[in-house]
Image (spheres, rainbow, N blue to C red):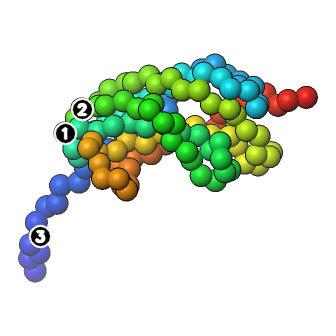
Amino acid sequence: MTCAFAATEVFVDGVRIVSITPSPLQEGERQEVEITLEYELVSRSAGRIYIGFNTDTPKGFTLVPNVEAAVERGKGRVVLKAKVVPRYWGDLTFFQAFANLSEDPHPKTWTPLATDSVPVEIRRKE
């Protein structure tokens, strides 16, 4: 028995939040944070990395306006700075940072090529 099939090229893009400074952040106070990210873009020649936080709802992320980095095919590291007001959502739902790697340019509505999110330590108000 012989089986014939055509190989399909599989592309795996990735983005990872490496660090967030300072840490911890103070709940309810506007602070500047620096987020270091690593990425690997293989499916497109150009991409864009965006960051966001779950500042508006505990289960959804809002991208920070005008905080983004253009990237090219390959691996790399970028550092983005943003201002954020951390929120306490409860003991079991964490305040989180979010990153997405998207094709560039992308349509008005799009699906990211890769995402990552990590809990951000916050210091509670007394």
Residue plotted at (9% across, 72% down)? 4
Q: Are the two marked residues, 2 and 1, in contact with CB atoms closer than 8 angstroms?
A: yes
Q: Is residue 89 above or below residue 19?
A: below
State left or right for residue 88 relative to residue 74: right
Residue plotted at (23% across, 46% down)? 43
Question: Most extreme residue toward the top, as rendered?
Answer: 22
How much space separates mark 2 and mark 1, taking CA atoms?
6 Å
Ranked by sequence position, the earlier of labels 1 and 3 is 3
What element does badge 1 sit on? Answer: strand
Ranked by sequence position, the earlier of labels 2 and 3 is 3
The image quadrant that residue 82 belongs to is top right
Q: Label 3, on which residue?
A: 5
Ranked by sequence position, the earlier of labels 2 and 1 is 1
Q: Amino acid at mark 1?
A: Ser
What element does badge 3 sit on? Answer: loop
Query: Is residue 20 visible in the rendered structure shown here?
Result: no
Residue plotted at (48% across, 36% down)? 65
Q: Position of residue 49 (x, y in %)?
A: 38, 36
State left or right for residue 122 relative to residue 110: right
Which of pointers 2 and 3 indicates the residue nearer the eye? 2
How much space separates mark 1 and mark 3, taking CA atoms?
28 Å
Q: Position of residue 86 (x, y in %)?
A: 70, 34
Query: Is residue 77 visible in the rendered structure shown here?
Result: yes
Q: Amino acid at mark 3?
A: Phe
Q: Label 2, on which residue?
A: 72
Q: Quadrant of the C terminus?
A: top right
What element does badge 2 sit on? Answer: strand
Q: Position of residue 106 (x, y in %)?
A: 29, 48
Q: Quadrant of the N terminus?
A: bottom left
Q: Label 1, on which residue?
A: 45
Mark 3 residue crowding within 10 angstroms, few (<14) / some (14–19) / many (20+): few
Q: Position of residue 91 (x, y in %)?
A: 80, 45
